[in-house]
Image (cartoon, rainbow, N blue to C red):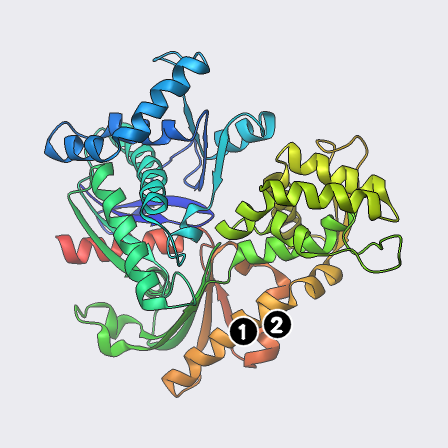
Amino acid sequence: MICGFDYGTSNCALGLSQGTDIRLVPLEGQHTFLPSTLYALDRDLITEFVGKNMRVGDERQAYISSRQHVLTRAQRARREEDIDDNDQTLFFGRAAFDEYFQWPEDGYFVKSPKSFLGATGLRSEHINFFEDVVAAMMQNIKQRAENHLGEEITHTVIGRPVNFQGIDSEASNRQALEILTAAGKRAGFKEIEFLYEPIAAGLDFETKLAENKTVLVVDIGGGTTDCAMVRMGPEYLVKVDRRADFLGHTGERVGGNDLDIRIAGKHLMPLFGMDTLLKNGLPMPTQLYWNAVTTNDVSAISTFNSMETKHQIEQLRLDAAQPKLIERFLRMREEKHNYHIVRNAEEAKIALSDVMEHNVLMDYIESGLACSIQRDDLAKSIEPPLEKMLRLMTAAIEQAGEKPDLIYMTGGSAKSPVIRDAIQKRIGNVPVLDGDHFGSVAAGLTVWSERIFR
């Protein structure tokens, strides 16, 4: 069986073709989208999970040999934490969020690992770890889909951003694709191809066009924003070689996660002392707070979790004009609630697509702790990443050398009226159409998988 696999930064989806129809497979109850999250009782149990779920054979044996040290630590963790062989050790999607919210200090929580795959300076053990995280997630999704279908899935087209990282993009892209390929093979896919995500989103949209158009496809994902200027419509739909129809494409590592981080920093971190003063009248250092919420940056999170940061916060508590806020910040760090805070920011972003004001409740930090955010204030706080997104759109248009007939928006953050208004102001009087904000990429990947594998 053939599928399109959207291994997204925020959500994952898997699509199948049935005749002329494309459908997404339910992955969690009736949900066709599984949040890109994993919670493990112990970090090393992720590697153990991958090994246990690989097919018996030479590849599995080679994998186990390459991870022997980690697997030995996993067995030690089982003994020390009294984890039975039949106990569930890994949780995915919404269940992973539930476990993290309940036990933030006890397990290992990973959100949006795709954001890290192209990171520069990763050592071999880091790459091995990300391979294992992605492989575990892919194994889980593939197994869920196969259990639902009653049939094995062997071939897939996986979506990829134009660039995984902005720095040294060629090496970054190569590293990320190698990680995804290794993980996909360990998940049991026999054939794997990749397709740019904005092009995939455009392929899905093209099947619905009644006449030929030049379309700017804008895919605002969780980790990246990708744009493509594409000629599409009935005349192009039947073509096998589409290279001449893609007039320009741009992409950068700026997406919905960056919006969430800005919202968390500007609106929620002041509850923990950001933007307050020290006793000497100087402003509170802000980098500590940005490190706390920059959950898509390995270096920032590592720094925030370090003992040096703990000591620095403890010193700031002595020097602060409002020490109770710093005590709250210190407690939040010790209890590992920073991912929860960014999740609150994401929920506020989603809510403010429909309402003008949203109240963020943070009782898990402290009873009665809350923050009200208005849409206009949100618009101001996300200006830096939004400006990067707008520049990507105009650069794609400039590459093409012509104005689009229409703009096709996809990706979860594309629903925001703040973003829609900014696009209209920057690009002008061009119709903006919505696709399936979460399903367009998976559907387009499925369309392409049918073309290349059949």
Q: Is residue 172 left or right of residue 192?
A: right
Residue visible at 40% across and 74% down in the picture: 215
In this view, the residue in front, 432 or 182, is: 182
Tell me where residue 18 sits by quadrant: top left
Tell me where residue 232 sits by quadrant: bottom left
User: In terms of sequence position, does the residue under pointer 1 or pointer 2 come before the other?
Assistant: 1
Where residue 184 appears, as percent x and y from the top left, is 25, 43
Q: Are marks 1 and 2 in contact (CB under 8 Å)?
A: yes
Q: Which residue is mark 1?
A: 390
In this view, the residue in front, 268 or 12, is: 268
Residue visible at 34% across and 43% down in the picture: 125
Dot 2 surroundings within 10 Å: few (below 14), some, or many (20 or more)?
Answer: some
Q: Is residue 57 visible?
A: yes
Q: Is residue 332 left or right of residue 318?
A: left
| Image: 187 above or below 82 | below
Front position among marks 1 and 2: 1
Q: Residue 262: give its label.
A: none
| Image: 235 above or below 55 | below
Q: Is residue 67 left or right of residue 134?
A: left
Q: Is residue 49 left or right of residue 425?
A: left
Disc 2 element: helix
Residue visible at 40% across and 50% down in the picture: 114
Disc 1 element: helix
In this view, the residue in front, 273 or 207, is: 273
Q: Is residue 354 visible?
A: no
The amino acid on which the numbered mark 1 sits, given as a three-letter code, is: Leu
Where residue 320 appears, as percent x and y from the top left, is 84, 48
Where residue 95 appears, as percent x and y from the top left, is 49, 29
Q: Which residue is mark 2?
A: 422
State the separation of the CA atoms marked 1 and 2.
8 Å
